[in-house]
Amino acid sequence: MNYKIVRLKTGQDSTHTSSVLIIYTGGTLGMAYDDTGALVPFNFGKILEKIPILYTMNIAITVISFPEPIDSSNVTTVQWADMAYIIQENYDSYDGFVVLHGTDTMAYSASMLSYMLHDLNKPVIFTGAQLPISAMRSDARENLVTSLEIATAKLNNQPIIPEVCVFFNHMLLRGNRAKKVQSLHFDAFESENYPPLAEAGIVIDYNTAYIRPVEMGKKLQTRNTLDNHVMILKLFPGITEDILDACFSIKGLRGVVMETYGSGNSPSDDWFMNSLERGLKKGLIILNVSQCNGGRVIQGRYETSKELLNLGVISGADMTTEAAVTKLMFLLGQEKDPEIVRKRLKIPLAGEMTA
């Protein structure tokens, strides 16, 4: 792929104490208004004009842009493989990585990269903006500058954040715990089931007890074989047997993330359970997550979820839908044996669930 590469002239080369690779995939942060008032991709060669504070940072910054910036609504497994490939190829040359990404599917991408980048020991910080970088009240400048600080932060010569994260509106969240919850306010993301890893105020306050520790001696491995023959099934009052059967009969379908009520509850009618059983007998893997932002699935806590457990539906515990569907795609691509997939769905791969 013909990536666009820009090396920013920040500070003096002799004063650079660390280095960061920015990966621009697309999204609002990298947009600017042209002379007609239309939004067009920003020329990162001129980013110092928009964020002059970057010049004073003792960071060597390189920007790699996708040949054509994409709206995050168009992100697929192809772009996830591209992001992982760029990080793998440049892993030894930089202290950290910042991925500029549209907000709509950022939590999906951060979740998937947390699985694909096995034995990661450097920061990979996803960030973006609700307003373009050229807008007067844009949140792009603060999000980018702080992400760069976090991507280069070290303690005892080791990275403080050796994992995939989302930074937005002063909060650093574990990437596979984040969820977009706002489209009109700057606090677009939250992590209901896991504490923030850091909060940026006058200083950046790291919540070290919840940050995955560095594992020295581990070498990054990129695992990019994915299988997207999955779907998300959101339950709702009035859902019918025909709808379930039609979903479970989709050609090539291998896995279903089923969004249930509360702590994992579903209808207890015979037709519903019979439809699930037919789907499971076809070899489908059904993963149960809650429609609630917070809390966890506890199959068997109530009578309405006890039968799900008996049928062989897998509890997604406190995973977000974003973490669950990407985990299912990842494991189906990595493992040929469905039983191994089922077993690995129940255990954390990258801190995405509480065991």
Image (cartoon, helix red, strand yellow):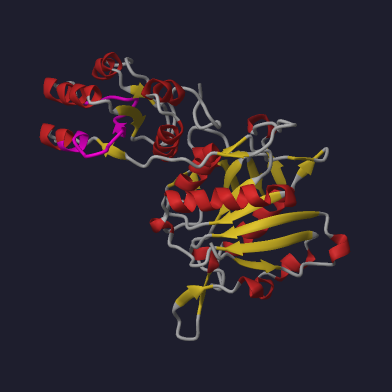
| Residue 349 position in % (x across, y down) | 53, 29
Q: Quadrant of residue 268?
A: top left
Whole-percent x, y for residue 266 in the image:
24, 26
The residue shown at (55%, 31%) is: 351
Please name the residue shown 43% across and 20% down the image.
Answer: 343
Q: Which residues are magenta?
A: 246-266
Q: How many marks?
A: 0
Give above or below for 123 relative to 128: above
Question: Measured from the top left, where is residue 329 in percent x and y?
Answer: 40, 38
Residue drawn at the location 55% of the way across and 32% of the way down: 350
Q: Quadrant of residue 316?
A: top left
**Magenta stretch contains residue 259:** yes
Membership of 54 in magenta stretch: no
Up the image or down, 239 lies above or below 285; here it is below
Q: Position of residue 1 (x, y in %)?
A: 53, 61
In this rendering, would 16 be left or right of 63?
right
Q: Image height check: is 45 above or below 274?
A: below
Q: Is 268 situated left or right of 68 in this image?
A: left
Between 210 and 248, the residue placed more toward the observer is 248
Whether residue 130 is visible, yes or no, is yes
Q: Quadrant of residue 249?
A: top left
Q: Is residue 167 visible?
A: no
Who's the residue at 50% across and 63% down the image? 26
